[in-house]
Image (cartoon, helix red, strand yellow):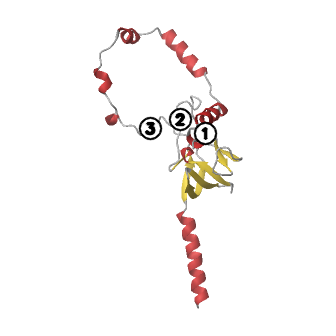
Amino acid sequence: MFTGWGLFFLVLFAFGQAAAREKVWVSSYDAKLKAEKSASSETIATLPLGTELLVFSFDDRWYHVSTADGKKGFLYRGRVSFEPPTGAQGKVGEDPLGKLLSGVADSNIKGDSADTSRSIRPLTVEKEKKKEPKNELVLQDELNNLLSRRITSSQIDRFLLEGKVGEYGE
């Protein structure tokens, strides 16, 4: 009799633990699933934006997760969200400006919380000149120049590493 109830509670506990596991989604482009809780450890897989993950644990800024295809590893907390991300057009993984505005559309900054104290400062002559309307061709050239700039993932990783920012922080 005891073994039957013991087995029942063991199975119930195991299913309860599996059901209690949390789901998170990859919230950054090309997130790297690491073998250990370190940005310098081996990369197991590169996960695209919106990948659903199952969380085993969270420790020291790193999530221990598994993917739908069974890959297990660690992902830095800044690369996941508790809700599936959407792109600027409402489609996961799509950003027409080359990842430039990812996350801006989903900003939690509200208009009521914006600080307007700077608006009462007097304008200088230089600022008045900047207010003058520009020629549309000049604006188009400036926009084209801005959009032609590309920052690669490796450049971003190098910046984070050298500055000890995010997952490279201590």
**Reading the chain from its start, which is encountered first: label 3 or label 2?**
2
Q: Residue at x 54, y 70 (%)?
A: 16
Residue 88 image offset from top left, x and y in percent? 51, 35
Q: Mark 2 points at which residue?
A: 102
- Judge left or right: residue 116 versus residue 6: left
Q: Residue at x 61, y 22 (%)?
A: 149
Q: Is mark 1 on a helix, strand or loop?
A: loop
Q: What residue type is labelled 1?
A: Tyr
Q: Which residue is drawn at 46% across and 39% down?
A: 106
Q: Which amino acid does label 2 sit on?
A: Ser
- Image quarter of residue 2: bottom right
**Relative to 127, residue 118 above or below:** below
- Image quarter of residue 8: bottom right
Q: Mark 1 points at which residue?
A: 29
Task: Tell me the crowding category of disc 1: few under 14, some 14 to 19, or many 20 or more residues within 10 angstroms, Cα based.
Answer: some
Residue 105 image offset from top left, x and y in percent? 47, 35
**Reading the chain from its start, which is encountered first: label 3 or label 1?**
1
Q: Which amino acid does label 3 sit on?
A: Ser
Residue 140 image offset from top left, x and y in percent? 52, 14
Question: 61 or 114, which lies in front?
Answer: 61
**Reading the chain from its start, which is encountered first: label 2 or label 1?**
1
**Marks 3/1: CA distance?**
17 Å
**Marks 2/1: CA distance?**
9 Å
Question: 112 or 75, which lies in front?
Answer: 75
- Count how many numbered circles sit on residues in the image: 3
**Marks 3/2: CA distance?**
10 Å
Circles 2 and 1, Cβ within 8 Å, touching? The answer is yes
Task: Tell me the crowding category of disc 3: few under 14, some 14 to 19, or many 20 or more residues within 10 angstroms, Cα based.
Answer: few
**Relative to 133, residue 45 above or below:** below
Mark identifier at residue 107 = 3
